[in-house]
Image (tube, rainbow, N blue to C red):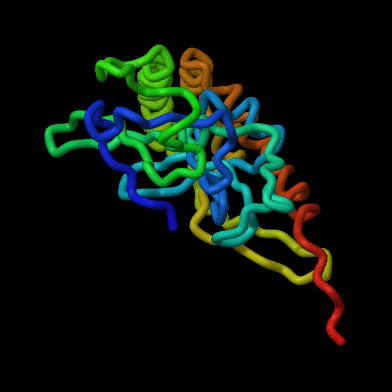
Amino acid sequence: MLAQPVVLSNEQHKDLHVLAQFSLESVVDRHITPLMLQEFATASTFYPIFFLQSGEEFAPVAVFGLKEGQNLFIKNDKWEGPYLPAGVRAYPFSLAQTDDDKLLLCVNEQSDNISRTEGQALFNADGKPTEFFDGVNKFFKDYIDANAVSRNIMAQIVEMGLLKPDGLQYRDVTGKEHRLNGFFVIDREKFEALNDEQFLNLRKFGVLQAIYAHFNSLDRIGSLIDRLPVEAPAA
């Protein structure tokens, strides 16, 4: 289990450095990861894209595995995913929301790409943010803006009644059928039945490319099946 992130502080973390290496622990045992609609075109080339419900909201996710805790893009302790979604790319940093809706930048001090002695410093000797820290800050500002757009578009898709529950179904190499429940997809029949005004509204907001990318991404389930480990036959 990953350590809980703490709020970043120039006093507590004055000697914190970030190593120029990918953090494998950020994707270990992760079968899904959050995705923004703006990432669909790229992510759909490699991963199936589904939607999960949380309360009344729905959020898109990229699927890395065919069961909980399974990441099929890790092999021999190496990440083989051709595209890393922004939500994972930000690690070891994350955002926390306060009771008054303020966002605080946090860090996982125990991350495998954090060091106290080498790498990119977050703060200068006088406690001021470094250029690297400014880059991290800008990343999250852009991420917040992009995520807000993605959530607004998702709200429109939900309002139009385009989502339907549909578990991730597949047949493994032995012919056994499996199903991972809890997922939603865009209902293709309802999408194709939209009237001209509804369709043009989706095009106006640049949603069509993401929807078609979602449809195409479902073909990537086959590539996940191909990554399943081959089990030795029973004796």
Q: Residue furthest bottom?
A: 235
Q: Quadrant of the C terminus?
A: bottom right
Instruction: Report the residue at 40% width, 26% height from top.
Output: 147
Which of 102/193 is in front?
A: 102
* Residue 218 locus on image (x, y percent): 68, 43
Placement of 27 over or under 230, stated as above or below: above
Which of 6/33 is in front?
A: 6
Placement of 139 over or under 180, stated as above or below: above
Choose top left, top right, bottom left or bottom right for residue 233. bottom right
Instruction: Report the residue at 80% width, 70% height from top.
Output: 231
Placement of 196 over or under 157, stated as above or below: above
Q: Residue furthest left?
A: 100
Q: Is residue 20 left or right of residue 81?
A: left
Instruction: Report the residue at 65% width, 32% height from top.
Output: 83
Which of 27/144 is in front?
A: 27
Choose top left, top right, bottom left or bottom right for residue 85. top right
Q: Is residue 222 visible?
A: yes
* Residue 119 locus on image (x, y percent): 50, 27
Choose top left, top right, bottom left or bottom right for residue 81. top right
Q: Is residue 140 left or right of residue 68?
A: left
* Residue 124 locus on image (x, y percent): 33, 17
Which of 156/104 is in front?
A: 104
* Residue 166 locus on image (x, y percent): 56, 54
Q: Is residue 121 left or right of residue 37?
A: left
Q: Is residue 162 visible?
A: no
Q: Quadrant of the N terminus?
A: bottom left
Total numbered labels placed on residues in the image: 0
